[in-house]
Amino acid sequence: MQSNAGDDAPTTINTLDLDYESLKSNYGDFSITVNGSEIPPVNNTYYLPVGSSSLTYIATGYFEGRIVIENSNNISSYKAVTILLKNACLVSDNEATISYTLTSKKISIVSEINSTNYVINKSTTNTEGHAISSNDDIDFYGTGLINLYAAHGHTIKSDGDFEISGTGSVYIYSGHDGVHCHNFSATKYSGNFTIANAISQGIEASVTSGTATLKISGGNFDISNAESMFKVDRAITISGGTVIGNNFSANAFVRGNEKTELSITISGTGSLTVNGTSYTGTTTV
């Protein structure tokens, strides 16, 4: 059955019960470096330029403000950018904490081995108050932990695709969608991915053209306390990994494109269990 409650409007505003003073003390002074050189902030914002070659910005420590990736040097053929989180805690109470403003290439968010990282947006009023926002694709990978919080916006918002790989862990608490993207892919992933709360969708793969899919072939996914678990245009394919969902206020699966059916296919070593019910084969909603 199609949910009639999936209009993407948050029904309440979350508050995030975090001890920021302790986080500030534990994480210490903040810096962003690239090729060994430190980048200075401007009015509590780090403006990071893309380059003619791929750049990796290394972020460490506690920071209250924003990180904005832009083409300030007007490079006609720029390359992708990586943000390496190395025991970093980033906190914004305004627009997106990490914002990729460009509409080609992609941004990669990497968690360093044995690191614990936070990307937080605690604004309770700004609809653009996402933790991570990109006008193009987002890649997640690494071997550390990334805790992602948004009080009112999407926790991860991509106008392109979202892909996660590696063995790192992700923990999401969202005031709107946990992940909001076009295609969602976890075909090279073997970590733990938790969406503990999402006022709207756990994962919405339904941004442009009505063709988006969600593919999982590894990892452990635990999605709970949302309006719906998955909102997807065309197809959900789980061919490996474990996917568990609980406690949804509307239907667990919602069609993103009203003109098409949504197929859910479980195959191989994949498993899907929602509110105690296991799915096998192909189901259409």
Image (cartoon, rainbow, N blue to C red):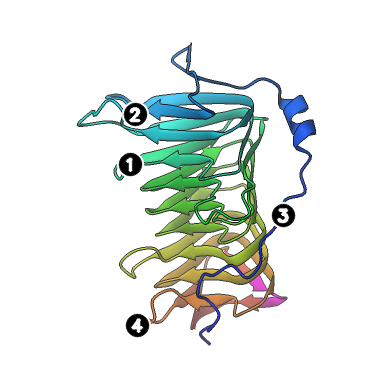
Q: Is residue 210 left or right of residue 33?
A: left
Sequence-wise, the earlier of marks 4 and 1 is 1
Foreground: disc 4 or disc 1: 1
Q: Nearer the viewer, mark 3 or mark 1?
A: 3
Residue 15's disc number: 3
List x then y, in percent, for residue 6: 52, 76
The answer to which of marks 2 and 3 sits earlier in the sequence is 3
Q: Are marks 2 and 4 in contact (CB under 8 Å)?
A: no
Q: Residue 139: give x, y in percent of width and height.
A: 45, 43
The residue lying toward the viewer, choosing from 33 and 282, is: 33
Counting residues from the start of the chain, the first of labels 2 and 4 encountered is 2
Judge depth for marks 3 and 4 and give the one in front. Answer: 3
Label 3, label 4: how far apart the Cα atoms are: 36 Å
Q: Which residue is mark 1?
A: 102
User: Which kind of residue does numbered mark 3 sit on?
Assistant: Thr
Label 2 neighbourhood size at 10 Å, few (<14), some (14-19), many (20+)?
many
Residue type at numbered disc 2: Val
Give the image location of residue 147, x and y in percent: 65, 43
- Earlier sequence position, callout 3 versus callout 1: 3
Q: Could you tell me which residue is drawn at 51 percent across and 27 percent down?
A: 43
Which of these two is toward me, 149 or 138?
Answer: 149
Magenta region: 273-277
Contact between labelled residues 2 and 1, with CB atoms less than 8 Å apart: yes
Say which residue label 2 marks. Answer: 50
Q: Which residue position is annotated with label 4?
A: 259
